[in-house]
Amino acid sequence: MKAIIQDVYGPADVLELRDVDPPVAGDGDVLIRVRAAGVEQGVWHLMTGLPFLTRAFFGFRAPKNPIRGRELAGRVEAVGKNVVGFRPGDEVFGTAEGTFAEFVCAKEGRIALKPVNASFEQAAVVPISGTTALQGLRDSGRLQPGQDVLIIGAGGGVGSFAVQLAKVLGAQVTGVCSTEKLDLVRSIGADHVIDYKHDDFADGARQFDVILDTAGNRPLSVLRRALKPKGTLVIVGGEGGGRWTGGFERSLRASMLSPFVGQALKGLMATERQEDLRFLAQLIDAGSVTPVIDKSYPLADTPAAIRYMHDGHARGKVVVTV
């Protein structure tokens, strides 16, 4: 099969399209023919090995799994003898290791039936970004109907899901994004938009019950000024920061400061759960959430897809078709 391979850490130039042996499903695995694969920030971290902290889990000198990609949508080809929830022919979406390939093996608990009303491309961009937004707002943020929520990075991959999910949860939504993404953020349901290039959301004029920060580069002091005295800040991912710990250092500082202030300050490390995939699929089929895709690239152009995503200009998500 064809797959996107890397032998060393580095920029997108280290990625190569090669022919490799297809995977074989173990007893608890589902073998999937990949139709599309989402491109998210975790792909960039595993490709570059930055921050260096990631290498402690994924390989010090080189990635343990040389095939990149983690989000997917496709069709089940075979199942292991212990798999009970899927059968060949099922259309599924979820996460696995090495999805920039024609075939991949996934664990049963990390996939779900694809939303009927979504294309493979739309379904492929949901599993990580969608569940991250859901867990950030519903679980960590404990967002309630009628509350005011500020979503920083509202026009990006996680942010575009967060805006729509916050509306599903009954919140009043303010999205922060660049000038180029204002119309997009309005179109997916934001009640108010702030252009960070021209306006300061932390000027004290307004405070929020919940802030979901997907951008990863603002000091805690700035974010706290925009947060109500008993509000909740949720920091998503580990963007920004130094080469050793990246933005995870900011999440750690937030957790350490939180017990000493009235505000709840949290870092989020999302968990990939089948029940969340099913919930998101229901919302997509109901028309309450629509995956936003900026660009689609063929498998051979995966390096270009990752570059475009990491540059931060994508309106919503980027997807690779296989």
Image (spheres, helix red, strand yellow):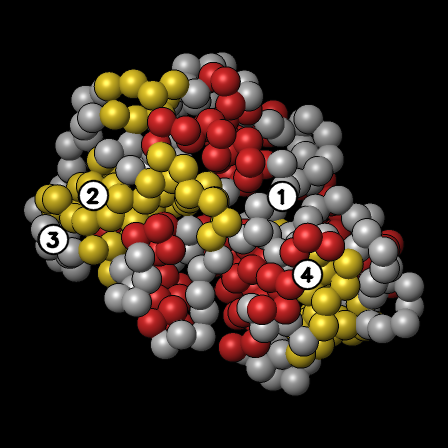
User: How many residues crowd around disc 2 within 10 Å: few (fewer than 14), some, or many (20 or more)?
Assistant: many
Under circle 2, the secondary element is: strand
- Please state, as top left, top right, bottom left or bottom right, where the C terminus lies in the image: top left
User: The residue under label 2 is which amino acid type?
Assistant: Ile
- Mark nearest the camera among 3 and 1 is 1
Going from N to C along the chain, the mark reached first, 4 or 3, is 3
Q: Quadrant of residue 117?
A: bottom left
Estimate the spatial distance between the alpha carbons at disc 3 and disc 1, rounded to whole Å. Answer: 36 Å
Mark sitting on residue 182: 4
Which residue is at 59% across, 73% downward? 189
Q: As drawn, is 295 to the left or to the right of 181?
A: left
Going from N to C along the chain, the mark reached first, 3 or 1, is 3
Per the image, the residue denoted by label 2 is 32
Observer able to see residue 321: yes
User: The residue under label 3 is which amino acid type?
Assistant: Gly
Under circle 1, the secondary element is: loop
Which residue is at 70% across, 46% downward? 216
Q: Are marks 2 and 1 in contact (CB under 8 Å)?
A: no
Per the image, the residue denoted by label 3 is 89
Estimate the spatial distance between the alpha carbons at disc 2 and disc 4, rounded to whole Å. Answer: 37 Å
Under circle 4, the secondary element is: helix
Q: Quadrant of residue 36?
A: top left
